Image: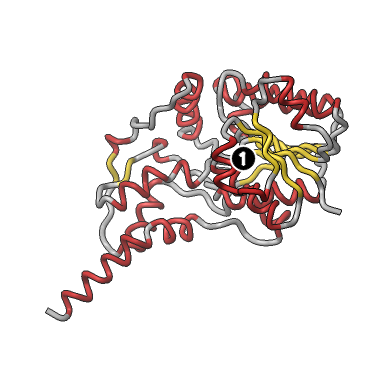
């Protein structure tokens, strides 16, 4: 019999992937969202939509009725710890069987005194463990789709790549791998006492990535060290302060370690940076190949 699963963060980048996978697997899904119209646009009648907010006790209790398992994900914010702890308490009161939490990267949590996001996730992890609920905590490393977005944008625009993280190596993880591990942990009711630390199969420096981009696009690719300090703005003031802290920790090489967690759980290797870049840069490569073909006929 399929489980009844509550998904939070369902309209975000990772939440969409998790929700779509659960639907495909035939699970009965309820999403708790502040954007019910967006949820209906995405999934129509394939999910039950509970309009509301994790910070609202009434909507939280209602969303957990008859739920077996919970996927816990919320964006970085000042209220992250308070809201996630409130959900854990409400889940315990509703006799939820299992919780899968997407946490911060290990290097933020292990350096919580230098990462406000890491401190918030650390607090939630400790609370979840203390409640004694069956759970799995997933700690993804730097996401390719987020961390490498400026690289892809620069490459597509024909610019030098931004020199990031002071040349430190990073074992980037693809968010499809995060989603696959999360779905497995949810559907299997995987209870683990230690966090599942997800990384890619190899760590890459900006120079390494420039070499990959150059090979894919078949042209020289430089690195703009002056672009290293630039970072996207954020609507949330907490996130605006938290993101530069990530960069400082990564620059110390703390995001370089590699784990075998993805392969151990999924039975396959994690998506490689090379594959990710090939997919993202395919339009630019195709345009270049077309142009080169036209020149041959002139």
Q: Residues within 10 Å of mark 1 (few under 14, many from 20)?
A: many
User: Residue drawn at (31%, 51%), measured in percent from left and top?
Assistant: 155
In the rendered view of the protein, which quadrant contains the C terminus?
A: bottom left
251 left or right of 292 in image: right
The coloring applied to the image is secondary structure
User: Residue drawn at (25%, 52%), measured in percent from left and top?
Assistant: 158
User: Residue drawn at (66%, 49%), measured in percent from left and top?
Assistant: 45
* Residue at which label 1 appears: 10
User: Residue drawn at (74%, 21%), measured in percent from left and top?
Assistant: 58
In the rendered view of the protein, which quadrant contains the N terminus?
A: bottom right
Q: How many marks?
A: 1
267 left or right of 107 in image: right
Residue 140: x and y, percent? 61, 41
39 left or right of 90 in image: left
Residue 244: x and y, percent? 44, 26
Residue 108: x and y, percent? 58, 29
298 left or right of 58 in image: left
Q: Along the line of sight, which residue is nearer the eye, 139 or 74? A: 74
Asked if 130 appears above or below 187 in the picture, the reply is: above
Q: Along the line of sight, which residue is nearer the eye, 137 or 257? A: 137
Which image quarter: residue 266?
bottom right
The secondary element bearing badge 1 is classed as: loop
């Amino acid at each position: 019999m399929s489980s009844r699963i509550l998904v939070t963060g369902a309209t975000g980048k990772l939440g969409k992937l998790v929700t779509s996978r659960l639907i495909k697997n035939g699970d009965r899904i309820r999403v708790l969202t502040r954007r019910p119209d967006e949820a209906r646009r995405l999934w129509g009648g394939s999910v039950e939509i509970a309009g509301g907010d994790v910070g609202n006790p009434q909507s939280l209790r209602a969303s957990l009725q008859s739920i077996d398992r919970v996927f816990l994900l919320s964006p970085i914010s000042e209220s992250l710890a308070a809201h996630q702890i409130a959900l854990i308490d409400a889940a315990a009161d509703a006799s939820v069987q299992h919780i899968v939490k997407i946490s911060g990267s290990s290097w933020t949590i292990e350096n919580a005194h230098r990462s406000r996001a890491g401190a918030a996730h650390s607090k939630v992890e400790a609370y979840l463990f203390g409640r004694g609920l069956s759970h799995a905590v997933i700690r993804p490393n730097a996401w390719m789709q987020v961390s490498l977005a400026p690289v892809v944008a620069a490459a597509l625009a024909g610019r030098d790549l931004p020199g990031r993280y002071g040349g430190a190596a990073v074992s980037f993880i693809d968010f499809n791998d995060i989603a696959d591990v999360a779905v497995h942990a949810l559907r299997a009711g995987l209870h683990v006492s230690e966090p599942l630390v997800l990384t890619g199969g190899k760590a890459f420096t900006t120079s390494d990535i420039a070499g990959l981009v150059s090979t894919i696009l078949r042209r020289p690719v430089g690195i703009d060290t002056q672009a290293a300090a630039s970072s996207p703005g954020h609507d949330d003031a907490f996130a605006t302060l938290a993101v530069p802290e990530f960069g400082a920790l990564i620059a110390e090489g703390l995001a370089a370690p590699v784990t075998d967690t993805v392969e151990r759980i999924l039975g396959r290797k994690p998506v490689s940076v090379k594959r990710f870049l090939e997919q993202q840069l395919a339009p630019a490569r195709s345009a270049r190949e077309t142009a080169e073909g036209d020149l041959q006929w002139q």
